[in-house]
Amino acid sequence: MIVNFMKCIVIAGFLGVVSGCVNGVPIQPLHSSISTVVPSDRVKTAILKAGREREWAMTVTAPGVITGQFQTRDHVVVIRITYSGTDYTIDYVSSKNMNEKDGMIHKKYNSWIRSLDKEIQLNLADNRNS
């Protein structure tokens, strides 16, 4: 009986550890430098276009600041992008149904942010050629 009880405790502990690893990853702020200096309006345009292409709702909230919102099914993420002619930073603001807690979030968040960053980089490369 004590052996069965100990097995249950070990299994429960193991499941708790495993479920914690599966459900959350650290929120990773993203900072990207722009290889050549471009006008900040071009950076703004590249960010807004990338948002549209990746189905983010983008809103210019201040000079050099864009707020983005992404929704898929019942998951919602809000980010803030600060930018200049030399770089931009994507920061987490809030979310719904993404299990955000203590700097951890659903693993898809970082994937969505990396995809948005790649699209911004592609748009910036296209802008330099026009």
Image (cartoon, rainbow, N blue to C red):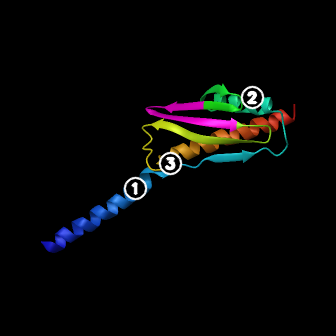
Which residue is depicted at the point 62% across and 27% down? 58
Let me know if residue 125 is in the magenta part.
Answer: no
Report helix, strand or loop for mark 2: helix
Report helix, strand or loop for mark 3: loop
Q: Amino acid at mark 3?
A: Lys
Q: Position of residue 13 (x, y in %)?
A: 31, 63
Q: Is residue 14 left or right of residue 9?
A: right
Which residue is depicted at the point 75% across and 39% down? 122
What residue does disc 3 label?
Answer: 107
Category of crowding for the residue at label 3, using alpha-carbon neighbours closer than 10 angstroms: few (below 14), some (14–19), many (at least 20): some
* Residue 20 numbered mark, or none: 1
Q: Position of residue 125 (x, y in %)?
A: 81, 39
Q: Is residue 7 left or right of residue 43?
A: left
Q: Amino acid at mark 2?
A: Thr
Q: Amino acid at mark 1?
A: Gly
Going from the N terminus, do you reach mark 3 or mark 2 first? 2
Q: Is residue 2 left or right of residue 65?
A: left
Q: Quadrant of the N terminus?
A: bottom left
Cα–Cα gap, marks 1 and 2: 39 Å
Cα–Cα gap, marks 3 and 2: 28 Å
Q: Position of residue 126 (x, y in %)?
A: 81, 35
- Which of the 4 image quarters holds residue 97? top left
What residue does disc 2 label?
Answer: 45
Let me know if residue 78 is in the magenta part.
Answer: yes
